[in-house]
Amino acid sequence: MSLLRLFKQTRGGVLPLVLVGLGAGGACAAGSAAAVVGGASAPAVARSDKPLPTAPGDYKTTAWKALVPKDWDPSQAFKGLNLLSLKDGDTKANTALERMRQVWDAAPAEPSMEGADIRIPGYVVPLEGDEKGLREFLLVPYFGACIHSPPPPANQIIHVTLSKPAVGVKSMDAIWVFGRLHLASSSTDMGKSGYHMDAQMTTAYQSTR
């Protein structure tokens, strides 16, 4: 699925598009590797040496919208352009999609989330693992992202590394991840992320509602 089609499915709303999916306790949305750390969207910061909490209750339940700076408006890059009138494949559409991808890949992280111990739901995009389990993956807010559809903005992708392998976790499984969030951009074959999480544990997703 193209970015343009995804955009049209949200009736032209860029910000609503990046926030669909699993909210903090919400429902699943309809729809379907080595890291390079650094980059302008997520400056290097000193990381805490404090051990990760071991109790699930010590992690704050967090919605994906909390990862988006309140003053970030990606639609500013498309003022005066009626994206809904464009068709896949034409020159104007290709130019707009290229610009949209640039804006999304450079999406800024929310500074206040640095070092936060959080619990967040999402879908798994595997990066590294073996018969002992999954050790590294991208966490994304809606089903199919990075696999069946284009990657979300960088501030809606978390690059997760686990303290111990997660057994039985597969591609596009819906899970809760518990860990410490950092502002650190990375680039993988599956997409660019604006956050890294040192994860303590994962559990199967269940709504808290």
Image (tube, helix red, strand yellow):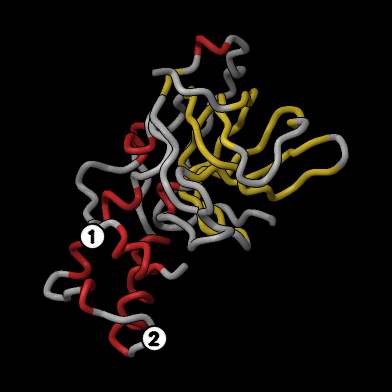
Task: Name above or below for residue 123 compared with residue 103.
Answer: above
Q: CA distance from mark 2 to mark 1?
A: 19 Å
The 10 Å Cα crowd at callout 2, few under 14, some 14 to 19, many 20 or more, is few
Q: How many marks?
A: 2
The quadrant holding residue 5 is: bottom left
Residue 22 x %, y %: 43, 36
Query: Residue lying farthest bottom?
Result: 91
Q: Amino acid at mark 1?
A: Arg
Q: Which comes sooner in the sequence, label 2 or label 1?
A: 1
The 10 Å Cα crowd at callout 1, few under 14, some 14 to 19, many 20 or more, is few
Task: Name above or below for residue 123 compared with residue 83.
Answer: above
The quarter of the picture where the C terminus appears is top left
Front-lying residue, 114 or 29: 29
Task: Find numbered disc 1 in the image and state the secondary structure of the residue it sits on.
Answer: loop
Relative to residue 114, is residue 51 drawn left or right? right
Q: Please name the residue shown 28% across and 43% down the image.
A: 69
Task: Name above or below for residue 196 compared with residue 192.
Answer: above
Q: Which mark is residue 89?
A: 2
Relative to residue 161, is residue 114 drawn left or right? left
Q: Tell me if label 2 and label 1 are in contact, CB under 8 Å.
A: no
Q: Please name the residue shown 27% across and 49% down the image.
A: 16
Front-lying residue, 152 or 169: 169
Q: Please name the residue shown 28% across and 56% down the image.
A: 10
Circle 1 residue: 11
Q: Amino acid at mark 2?
A: Gly
